[in-house]
Image (cartoon, helix red, strand yellow):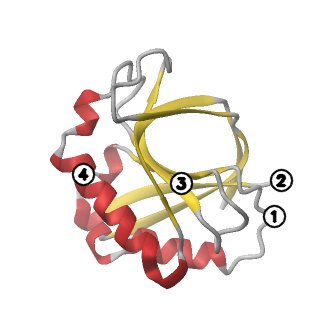
Amino acid sequence: METIEIKPFKVIGISITTTNENNQAAQDIGKLWGRFETENIFEKIPGKVDFEVLSIYTNYQGDYTKPYDNIIGCRVDSLDNIPEGFFGQAFMGGRYNKISCRGNIMEGIVAKTWGEIWNKNLERAYSADFEVYGQKAQNLEDAEVDIFVAIN
């Protein structure tokens, strides 16, 4: 795990409010990913600055045990042109712990890594945590995903 500084960025995508209680987030976020794929959301996002997809956890109503928003989308150069039904948000950036996981996405390697993060004694900021699905995540059976956890 390394500590890095993330610069401010903007994202456009689709979002849902969920909670980790009763495994609700796994169901909700799974449906959101399904919508992202079936509705070809990636292609409809204007002003993308790269080809990475971000899954962002933000607007926490407390810690990870309380409701929060999940946004699946892309970094963009502007929030001036948000398509109808989409969501846009600017993020301040800041100090982050970077944790990489590798394995089969369909077998829950990312969720498993989050379980490990929840059990670590990190001084989390609960501002915006996110996963980056880039070139190394294209092979779902042997994907590498970077997780960035905001810290104080």
Marks 2 and 3, how far apart at CA: 20 Å
Q: What amino acid is at disc 1? A: Glu
x and y, in percent, of residue 51 in the image: 34, 33
Q: Is residue 146 above or below residue 94?
A: below
Residue at 47% across, 77% down? 112
- N-terminal of the pair, mark 2 or mark 3, is 3
- N-terminal of the pair, mark 4 or mark 2, is 4
Seen as rendered, the residue at the extreme front is 84
Marks 1,4: beta carbons within 8 A: no
Q: How many marks?
A: 4
Residue toward you, 144 or 32: 32
**Disc marking residue 35:** 4
Q: Which residue is mark 3?
A: 69
Marks 1,2: beta carbons within 8 A: yes
- N-terminal of the pair, mark 1 or mark 4, is 4
Residue at 64% across, 70% down? 66
Q: Is residue 127 left or right of residue 111?
A: right
Query: Is there any visible trace of residue 17 in the rendered image?
Result: yes
Marks 3 and 1, how far apart at CA: 20 Å
x and y, in percent, of residue 140 in the image: 24, 61
Residue at 76% across, 61% down? 124
Residue toward you, 75 or 4: 75
Tag in front: 3 or 1: 3
Q: Is residue 62 left or right of residue 35?
A: right
- N-terminal of the pair, mark 3 or mark 1, is 3
Mark 2 Cα within 10 Å, few/some/many (few <14, many 20+)?
few
Q: Is residue 113 left or right of residue 50?
A: right
Q: Which residue is mark 2?
A: 152
Instruction: Label 3, secondary structure: give it.
Output: strand
